[in-house]
Image: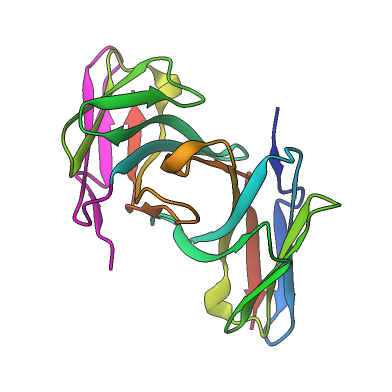
Amino acid sequence: DVKVTQSSRYLVKRTGEKVFLECVQDMDHENMFWYRQDPGLGLRLIYFSYDVKMKEKGDIPEGYSVSREKKERFSLILESASTNQTSMYLCATGPTGNNQPQHFGDGTRLSIL
Amino acid sequence: DQQVKQNSPSLSVQEGRISILNCDYTNSMFDYFLWYKKYPAEGPTFLISISSIKDKNEDGRFTVFLNKSAKHLSLHIVPSQPGDSAVYFCAARRSDGGATNKLIFGTGTLLAVQP
């Protein structure tokens, strides 16, 4: 079974703080993804990475950055947290190749006060 | 611009009956479609998928139908069980999306199966 581990299930931070969300996968997958889930909006892609040190913007990258220094680890960074970044953050991983599903971690519920 | 649409935010079904969840898409470049199930406070779990070269895929109680001409897919759950109560997301992949399998998700449908 694919295991995707997100470092925190719940996190509370203050406006203006720099926030790090960590994700680790154990399946040696090339691709890793960060989404946020908000009511009525579904899952929206923030950033993804297809290899170590490689990253591409998703649909809503503003206010976020990412880091992938090792294949198994993909970090999402909120440079200066704002209240509109309060959300559920989901990390996913998937292999390269056609018709392969992504597999998700359990999510981090982040609240920015 | 919502390329993958789930127009029903919620659905209530009696235990033992069929649940039908619907999804519409607008981009004819989508070639691979998936359904995920999500319980509260957990991540989405992959349920079933279908390639655009097929019109049906079945896995136990779950069947996905694809109608390419209508740009419509549906998930059938028969028989429905209370443990199926969750939010269901459909997702689609663009054929020119490269090998990363980048997905576009719908907004989700909350299924409630009543005992």
Query: For residue A16, which quarter of the picture?
Result: top left
Report the front residue among A38 and B103.
Answer: B103
Q: Residue A22, position in %: x, y?
A: 21, 37
Taking A75 as reference, is B15 left or right? Answer: right
Q: For the N terminus of chain B, which image quadrant?
A: top right
Report the front residue among A18 and A77.
Answer: A77
Q: Residue A77, position in %: x, y?
A: 26, 23
Q: Residue A88, position in %: x, y?
A: 41, 40
* Residue A10 sits inside the magenta stretch: yes
**B12 up-or-down from B31: above or below:** below
Residue located 63% across and 44% down the image: B107
Q: Residue furthest right?
A: B70
Residue B69 visible, this orientation? yes
- Which residues lie in the magenta part? A1-29
Residue B39 visible, this orientation? no
User: How is the structure coloured here?
Assistant: rainbow
* Residue B34 sits inside the magenta stretch: no
Total labels: the figure holds: 0
**A32 up-or-down from B57: above or below:** above
Q: Residue furthest left?
A: A70
Query: For residue B14, which quarter of the picture?
Result: bottom right
Residue located 18% across and 40% down the image: A73
Q: Residue B64, position in %: x, y?
A: 67, 68
**A46 up-or-down from A40: above or below:** above
Residue located 65% across and 81% down the image: B80
Residue located 69% across and 33% down the image: B2
Query: For residue B51, which quarter of the picture?
Result: bottom right
Q: For the C terminus of chain B, which image quadrant?
A: bottom right
